[in-house]
Image (spheres, helix red, strand yellow):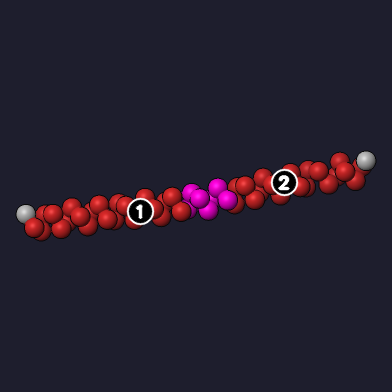
Amino acid sequence: MTKVIIDRPKSKMNEVSSLRRHSLKRERFAMLKTCELLILFFLKNNYWWVYK
């Protein structure tokens, strides 16, 4: 019984840490995507100004 009680929190922590790592990856990916979109938007605007 005591072994189970000792082992359970550790596995819970691993679950939480893995979830956090996954969410961090997703956040970084989202940041990269938004940065890409912003850069593309600015480039489009610059080209528009040049053509006008």
Is residue 36 left or right of 24 when viewed as pictured?
Answer: left
Find numbered disc 2 in the image and state the secondary structure of the residue it sits on: helix
In the image, taking residue 26 as reference, residue 1 lies left or right, namely right
Tell me the chief SS of the magenta region. Answer: helix
Q: Is residue 8 left or right of residue 36?
A: right
Mark toward the start of the polypeptide (2 vs 1):
2
At 90% from the left and 46% from the top, the residue drawn is 3
Q: Is residue 23 magenta?
A: yes
Image point 25% across, 52% down: which residue? 41
Residue at image x 69%, y 47%?
Answer: 15
Instruction: Tell me, for residue 35, which label it has, or none.
Output: 1
Q: Are marks 2 and 1 in contact (CB under 8 Å)?
A: no
Q: Secondary structure at mark 1?
A: helix
Residue furthest left in the image: 52
Does the magenta-highlighted stretch encompass residue 2? no
Q: Which mark is residue 11?
A: none
Residue at 34%, 56% (x, y): give it: 36
Residue 12 percent coordinates (x, y): 74, 44
Q: Give the residue type that dot 1 points to.
A: Cys
Measured in 3D between alpha carbons, the distance from the residue under mark 2 to the one under mark 1, in whole angstroms, is 33 Å
Say few, some or many: other residues with alpha carbon within 10 Å of mark 1 (under 14 / 14 to 19 / 20 or more). Answer: few
x and y percent of residue 4 in the render?
Answer: 88, 43
Image quarter (top left, top right, bottom left or bottom right) of the C terminus: bottom left
User: Residue 13: which numbered mark, if any?
Assistant: 2
- Numbered range of the magenta stretch: 22-28
